[in-house]
Image (tube, rainbow, N blue to C red):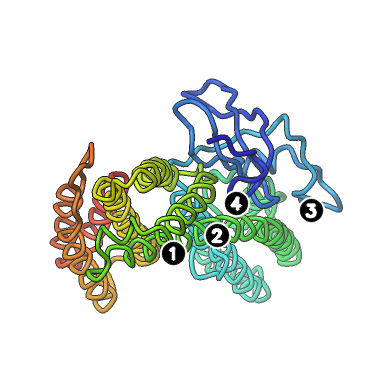
Amino acid sequence: MYVDPFNRIGSGRIRHVQISDNGNLKKVEARGGLCGGDIRVAIMGPLRGKILIPVWLNIVGHTAMRDDKYEIKYHDQKYLLYQVFNSIYDAERYTYHLLEEQYGITYRHGEKGQLLKARQALEEYNIVVSGLRIGNAHELGITFLEMAQSILEQIGKSPRDENKRKARDMTISLATVFDRLERVNPSAKMAVSVGVMNKLKQRTLNISCIEPHIIARRLILKSIIEEMELYLEGVYNFLSLLFHPKNSAIEMLRSATRDSIVQQLGFYVQQISRYDIAPFDRTAAHVSSEFSNASFFIRHYEAAKARDELRKSWNSLALSRVRTEIEDLILQITFMLFGKPTSVNQKQCDGVITRLRQLARRLTKVDESGFKHPVAKKVISQVRTADRLVVKKTVPELKEAKAVLKQAATLL
């Protein structure tokens, strides 16, 4: 069924964008920007259904500078290079890695936290410098070196950002008590320290300008995910009513019931045909085909065949609901691993274990009769493997469990 790109989930228009394929630029036909943002979805070829997001450093590199600040909204589309994500869930997790872990929106983790520590160390450095005299210069030599090293650890040895590179170079001169003319000059040291502080403040400000745009991406991805999840949940509940023990196959053949069921199935096909984003596109394609087949059989009074088609959809949607749970667990484990912890939260692990065991039980109830590619048994095995790993409650095993759950999710 053809669906106008504007009417698909998230709306948008078709255009060609470029990605990096093993170091070579490649043009990809994609729909976007979804919900008015800069996120796109590939619509053709092997990348079909995958999410495309502009590489952030590429955006910044081709963005106009206004008043020494990045104005992200000003950029030339022809220069943008897009990053490919296998599913919309992967793209959503990426925003958490960027904000919470890489940039550190709450200052607990990431670059903003490091910049804050560097600025605090500079303030301590200034206090020591204020007491610098000719008489104690040699005594403070090691202190200056250690404090400068502490600041450099937070800035990094090879920062990509220009402000941080300048701050690094200036900090090196803070490691000695003497200036370039071999004089003890506390005022000059403090001036350099303030210069470093200003560069770090500017970098923090630039990150703060970036954050709202990444948050906007996350909100778009979340809204699209939730719309598809909730709608498919409604379709699942509709099928659950049809398969209620009190409803027999004969019910589908009664004229009033038959017409309303066919009409409802047709409406669902129209709606879910809009879903061209992985992983929902596969489920939508299967369910649309099965609903169309079921409608044909109902109209021709073949209720048993119709129920077979609808039962496949019912169980397919049950697997889709399991994937939703697995993706949420992956996100939870991702949060638990932020900040490179050396130990894990025991209570949170217990919660993950409980949910994994519930998922395994739910999967045993899925009937894959008539499925071309049954997956439930493989997913059960992987969920139980993840369970055994999380039970150990160590960081390495938790990382491994996350990888196993990612593999399980790709099957659904």
In what element is the residue under mark 4?
helix
Q: Residue 385's x, y, as percent?
A: 15, 55
Q: Point out which mark residue 69 bears.
A: 3
In what element is the residue under mark 3?
strand
Q: Amino acid at mark 2?
A: Leu
Residue beneath disc 1: 234
Cβ–Cβ under 8 Å for marks 3 and 2 = no
Q: Amino acid at mark 1?
A: Gly
Give me the residue at 62% from left, 67% from top.
Answer: 119
CA distance for labels 4 and 2: 29 Å
Cβ–Cβ under 8 Å for marks 1 and 3 = no
CA distance for labels 1 and 4: 62 Å
Q: Quadrant of residue 56?
A: top right
Q: Is residue 340 visible?
A: no
Work out whether mark 1 precedes mark 3 in sequence or the reverse, and give the earlier one. 3
CA distance for labels 2 and 1: 33 Å
Q: Residue furthest right?
A: 67
